[in-house]
Amino acid sequence: MLLRGFTSVRDVGGPIFPLKNAIDQGKILGPRVWPSGAVISQTAGHGDFRTPQERSRKFFGQPSRAELFGATFIADGKPEVLTAVRENLRFGASQIKLMAGGGTSSAYDPIDVTQYTLEEMQAAVEAAEDWGTYVTVHAYTDRAVQKAIQAGVKCVEHGQMVSEETLKLMPEKGIWLSLQNLMEDSPNMDPARREKRKPVLEGQKRVWAKAKELGVKLAWGTDFLFEPELNKEQNAYILKLQEWFSPAEILKMITYDNARLLALSGNRSPYPGELGVIKEGALADLILVDGNPLQDLSLLAQPEEKFLVIMKDGKVVKNKLD
């Protein structure tokens, strides 16, 4: 990822801490990571990845494999949500990821369902704010997003199914929308997942255009969790933004705007310093591109050939000029 030009990334859910620590200690070459730790989900929520044979920890006492792996917390009720949030913060989470609605890659929850009561979400927000950071939520629908905003979350991941009414609410409340260009269906994709993705893919183009028109604070990311073979195409997904944005707008979004979203972590940021700008005292991250991406954005999709120098924190990690 670092050699594709991404010097700083936000990991919104999963067992990232050992890898992050190895990068920070210089044992592995990689980007800075803003970690969320395990996603927090209700029972039968988007983070409930139990197999049919795995029964509820609450009734039968055995955590699920995904929980033991550090990928998720299944937490129901205010006390369990508070504990899950605080557990992630204890391990160094820079922000908290809550599952607020149905998803396409989970077996139990239809895409239209809303997850967590207002009280449960407010508990997560309060616990995060007590540590000077914020909650971001997985949500697609109006009801899920509007409830999350009411609870005090600062960022929504996805949101491809929301209406213009909800999009208008986001800039009024200062809410970030972290959008992705989701991959099209693949032949090896489970038929049930393909069916669940239909309304999300249908809403994708509409939401980008309308969010831009309404002045929503937009961040860009990828969602390759279950398709690791797509990692090598990460840069090419930037080009998909050209349908709605100019090259200058895209470059600003993936550098300066994304850096502003990372800065929401405040004192919980693992890395002091300013990102997304080139000025004295800022974190010294630079890419020397062979060509002008303002005129030819496709250069960004050719990092191996066109990224001549990559610098992270003032240290050159790639140099094709020698």
Image (cartoon, grey):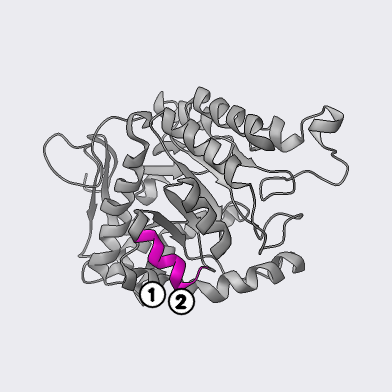
Q: Position of residue 67 (x, y in %)?
A: 70, 34
**Residue at coordinates 38% horizontally, 46% vertically from top-left?**
3
Cα gap from disc 1 to disc 2, whole angstroms: 6 Å
Q: In this view, does 246 lie above or below 175?
A: below
- Residue type at mark 1 is Ala
**Residue at coordinates 26% horizontally, 66% vertically from top-left?**
249
Q: Where is residue 87 in the image (x, y as percent from the top left)?
A: 57, 26
Label placed on residue 206: 2
| Quarter of the image where one finds residue 189 | bottom right
- Element class at badge 1: helix
Q: Mark 1 points at which residue?
A: 209
Q: Where is residue 288 in the image (x, y as percent from the top left)?
A: 22, 52
One can see residue 302 in this view: no
Is residue 37 in the magenta section? no
**Residue at coordinates 54% horizontally, 64% vertically from top-left?**
142
Q: Give the range drawn in magenta.
A: 162-171
Q: Characterize the local packing of mark 2: few (<14), some (14-19) or many (20 or more) Cα atoms within 10 angstroms.
A: some
